[in-house]
Image: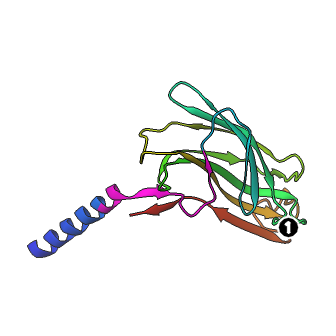
Amino acid sequence: MRQRTAITLLALAAIFLLAGCSHLSVRHLKRQPWSLETVQVLEMKFWRFEYAATPGTDTFLVRGRAYPTDAVPAWAGWVQDLWLESYLADTSGEVIAKDLRLYQPRDLEHDKGLYFEFTLRPDRLGDPGQLFLTFGYRMKLTESRPDAEDQDEDTGRVFFASEGALTRL
């Protein structure tokens, strides 16, 4: 019994130690050098982000619009589920600040896009050198708005896509 307890405690300690060493990485995502007060465009696989970053008090604000790319099916007309996330990363791709926005179900207006505003609060500077900005998203698009009666059911075609930071040990 004592041996089993000791093994369990060692296993828990190892898990907590590994969790403490983990970090978010965006090394696999397209990213751009961080630039203040300049309109920039970053095209990911399914969203194009047009944005500008401005300094705040102990924060950076990233404001702009996200537009679906041509890779999004033309039949997709309804946003059933969507979150957008902004990441500030160091040269190695380690995330030093992030912010998340959740969107309510809505029409997908390809030409108008979606407004976003992120507040990034770095708690450290990460590796020395240039900083980078990138975005993540998770979306579920449908052909049309579900009827009120079957709000939770998928009717017609469904398109799902996701890009985001990965946890690295």
Q: Residue at x 43, y 63 (%)?
A: 168
Q: Alpha-carbon neighbours of circle 1 within 10 Å: few (<14), some, or many (≥20)?
A: some
Q: Amino acid at mark 1?
A: Pro
Query: Residue 73 placed where, x, y %?
Result: 85, 67
Residue 100 shown left or right of residue 160 in the figure = left
The answer to if 38 sits in the magenta stretch is: no
Q: Residue at x 58, y 33 (%)?
A: 60
Query: Residue 98 placed where, x, y %?
Result: 54, 45
- Given residues 66 and 127, the one toward you in this image is 127
Q: Is residue 169 visible to us here? A: yes
- Given residues 78 and 119, the one toward you in this image is 119
Tell how many labels. Answer: 1
Q: Is residue 116 visible to us here? A: no
Q: Quadrant of the C terminus?
A: bottom left
**What residue would you read off at disc 1?**
73
Q: Residue at x 42, y 56 (%)?
A: 23
Query: Residue 40 placed where, x, y %?
Result: 72, 43
Residue 86 shown left or right of residue 145 in the figure = left
Which portion, as a residue range, is magenta? Answer: 18-33
